[in-house]
Amino acid sequence: MKAVLKNQFLFYVFTAATLFISPVWALLAGIIFGMTKLFFLPGKLGSYRKYTLEAAIILLGFGLNFGQVMTVGSRGILQTAAGILVLMTAGMLIGKALGLDKKLSSLINVGTSICGGSAIAAVSGVIDANDDEIAVSTGVVFILNAAALFLFPLLFQLIQISPDVYGIWCALSIHDTSSVVGAASVNEVSLATATILKLTRTLWIIPLTVFYKVVNKSQSKSKFPYFIALFLVASLIATFIPFPFYTDIAKLGKILMSPALFMVGYAININTIKKVGFKSIAHGIVLWIISIFLGLFIAFNV
């Protein structure tokens, strides 16, 4: 029986099955399967999640007008810059107050301020973080991402804000792109706004990585998030060479968010939670609470 459950084919069946359920249920299923440790765990799970998410984002571009992308994106430069500056400053102060290791604190800060696991991966190389520091910071982000996917749609219903404001709020206050898109999927307006603004926020990985590289005198190379460029190309094609089937392509991108989030949940297990520790999770929670209120303030005022 154990050999059957550990068969890798089952993992691919489970992942494919999530194409037919909502992102929230896909994440919950992933967490349940990941926690049991009864099933096959792919060594390249992080890569599978990354490429599935990036493919989904690119396909979503076919459903957006390029003018809309430029309008939201240009406005988002100021919004995301304001949020990142405040959160990075607050994160450094929280890390010092908790006596957290400087490198670990930096990874939690960039993961919360910019783009979850992607920002952690980019910055970890230039500050020479070890595997434990990367694992713990990623664990903090993944756990809070999971909470955000359930919390934000509930808050949207409770406080009754406009879809556009909700989309901005999701993009500024949720760590990882997959959870931003999943939480913003309550309607098409919030989804479009959140996707564009989150990608604008993701671009700040580049200058922040350069900053850490200069401060740490690192020789490692930074990677440009090419999927953002492909997202823009998809939007350009849909705008200037319009075809009716682009709508279906964009819907496929939305559907692909479910397996991406299933894999996010699948990576969370008891060992991940044990590694995180009280100080790290306290750092992540306090900084995220600040991010939630700050994001809502910016959404209404900037």
Image (cartoon, rainbow, N blue to C red):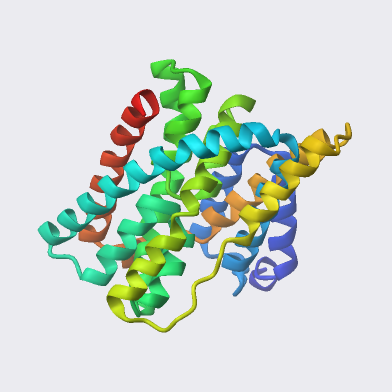
> Whole-percent x and y of residue 166?
47, 27
Q: Residue furthest bottom?
A: 219
Residue 246 to residue 217: above or below: above
> Whole-percent x and y of residue 249?
80, 41
User: In the rendered image, which quarter contains the N terminus?
Assistant: bottom right
Q: Is residue 188 visible?
A: yes
Decide if residue 223 is on the left or right side of residue 40.
left
Q: Work out whether residue 38 or residue 182 is closer to the camera in this orientation and state it.
A: 182
Residue at point 36%, 81% (across, down) = 218
Decide if residue 59 is on the left or right side of residue 107.
right
Numbered label tally: 0
Residue 76 to residue 85: above or below: above
Instruction: Examine the image and state in which quarter residue 15 appears.
Output: bottom right
Q: Is residue 270 visible?
A: no
User: In the rendered image, which quarter contains the C terminus?
Assistant: top left
Q: Work out whether residue 135 or residue 105 is closer to the camera in this orientation and state it.
A: 105
Q: Residue furthest top?
A: 160
Residue 99 to residue 128: above or below: above
> Whole-percent x and y of residue 147?
41, 42
> Whole-percent x and y of residue 89?
22, 52
Decide if residue 14 is on the left or right side of residue 219.
right
Residue at point 74%, 43% (across, down) = 236
Residue at point 27%, 71% (across, down) = 103
